[in-house]
Every structure is written in structure tokens, then in C-alpha cells.
Amino acid sequence: MFDNFHTKICDQLPFWMCNIDVHKPALRDLITNQRIYVHLPHRDDEGRRIFLCQLGRFDVGKDILYNFHDYIAYSGVTMMVSNREEETQVNGYVIFLDLTDQTMKHMTFMPIEFRRKLFGLFSNQLPARIKSMIMYNAGPVWETMWNLAGHFVSAKIKERMSYCKTMEEVYKLIPMRCLPREYLPDDYNGPCAGNLADIASYLYSELSKPVVRDRILELSTKYFKVDESKRPVITDAEVASFRKLHVD
């Protein structure tokens, strides 16, 4: 999986996890202002990292600071940091997709050929344990995108997908204490993750610390690549000697 992951990134999506500098103005804007991918601070009752994706909430106007390469790099650096957490490696992720206000401009911001590659990589080569995917407020735009690229998603991931029309349905899958204030009822007075602006600001402050920023630069420039000249030739007999391992 790791071999496939790094090979695919180098060949097809080099801008996802290669040459990432969080001090780049586009990345700073995406993390602190657009808040498309939000690494929520609290884990659920099973110790899983919750990843909020607001796919209809970002600016797609003419004067934006970022392009779709930056958009993908933003998701990459967020997942890069999360994947290095030991607890996340063991317990996996819950992906919460908020599709509220998603338009065709949001969907076409990333060209469909790259979306297909990303879907295929996400479901088949990503070294992460996706334990649950929750789609909230899905509409015609999501259905169109899913019809175009959904067949690239593995059967295992599809089995873990849930569609919710109301936040009450979401609360049955994600504890309210784990969600941002913006996703909770006005009369809710219990614990929560805080507001999105503060969560995003804290995330950026952590990512931009010199030791973290330098490590991200090092990983994304030196290690997210494959030197094919060093790949050993594998014979059919060697392949046959390994049995397939099934992991969730």
C-alpha cells in the first residue's frame, strides 16, 4: 500500500503531498479562512479522529488566493499530520462531509480527471483507516459528482458510508461534544469542540511552528517520491510466495 501510495502521488497527484510550505499565502487562507478540511480536536468514543470537510463553504470567486493544486495540498498536509498520530493509526478516521450549499462551481473547482484519481487513491492506496464516512445534506451536485467518480471508491468504503438529512441523524453517529459550535443547537450548553474560527486558527498555529513546518517541508520534498531505478525486479515465483492479508 505504501509503495502504491507514494508511486501514485509522484506520478498522478504530485501537488497533494509534495513540496508543501504552510507559510504559502494560499495555504494560510485555506486553513484559517476557508476551513474546507478541519481536523477536529476531540476524538469520538472509539478514539477515532474526526475530519470535517465543508465542501460547499469555500470561496470559488475570481479573486481567490488559491487554485485547485493548493486545495489538494491543503487536504494533504492536514492528513499528513493526522496520519502520524499513533492513536489515529490504530483507531482510524471518521470523515464528516458537510455538503450544504455545494454548487457546480465547487464541484468543478477540481477537474473531474483529478477527482477520479483522488477517489481511486483515497479508497485503494491511502495508508489510513477510514472507519466511517458521513454525508450530510447531500443534494443534486453531490449526486452528479458521485455518478461520475463514485465507481472509483472501493466496496469497503461504500459499506461505511451513511447519508444524513438532519443534524439529529448526525448526532447519532458523532458525539455532540466532538462537533464545532456551528453544528450544534442554539440551546445546547454541553461540551463541544469550540467554534470553527478558533479551531482553524489553532491548527494553523500548530502547523506553522518552525519544527512542524520544517518537518512537513522535509517529508514533502525528500520522502514523498519513488526512485524507480532502485526498484528490484520481482519474479512471479516471489509474488506467489506471499499470501494476501485482509485488514480493515
Image (spheres, grey):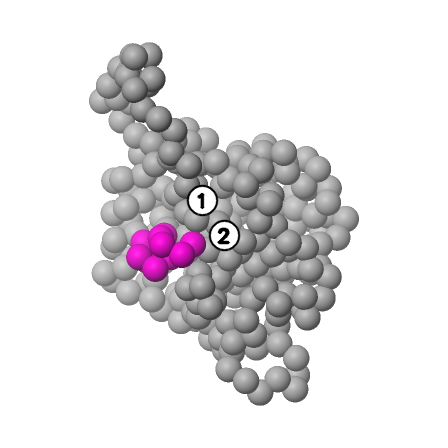
Indicate the position of residue 42 as horizontal and vertical percent values.
44, 70
Asked whether the residues under the numbered discs 2 and 1 touch, taking CB atoms below 8 Å apart as contact, a structural biologist would say: yes
Indicate the position of residue 111 as horizontal and vertical percent values.
60, 37
What is the span of residues highlighted in magenta in the rendered image?
Answer: 83-92
Among all residues in the image, which is located at the extreme right?
140
Nearer-the-camera pick, 194 or 87: 87
Residue, disc 1: 248
Residue 148 seen anywhere in this rendered image of the structure: yes
Amino acid type of the residue tagged 1 in the rendering: Asp
Amino acid type of the residue tagged 2 in the rendering: Lys
75 displayed left or right of 222: right
Residue, disc 2: 131
105 displayed left or right of 201: right
Q: Quadrant of residue 185?
A: bottom right
Question: For the point 52% across and 76% down, which residue is it?
Answer: 177
Return the disc, 2 or 1, that comes first in the chain's sequence.
2
Is 9 located above or below residue 76 in the figure? above
194 displayed left or right of 19: right
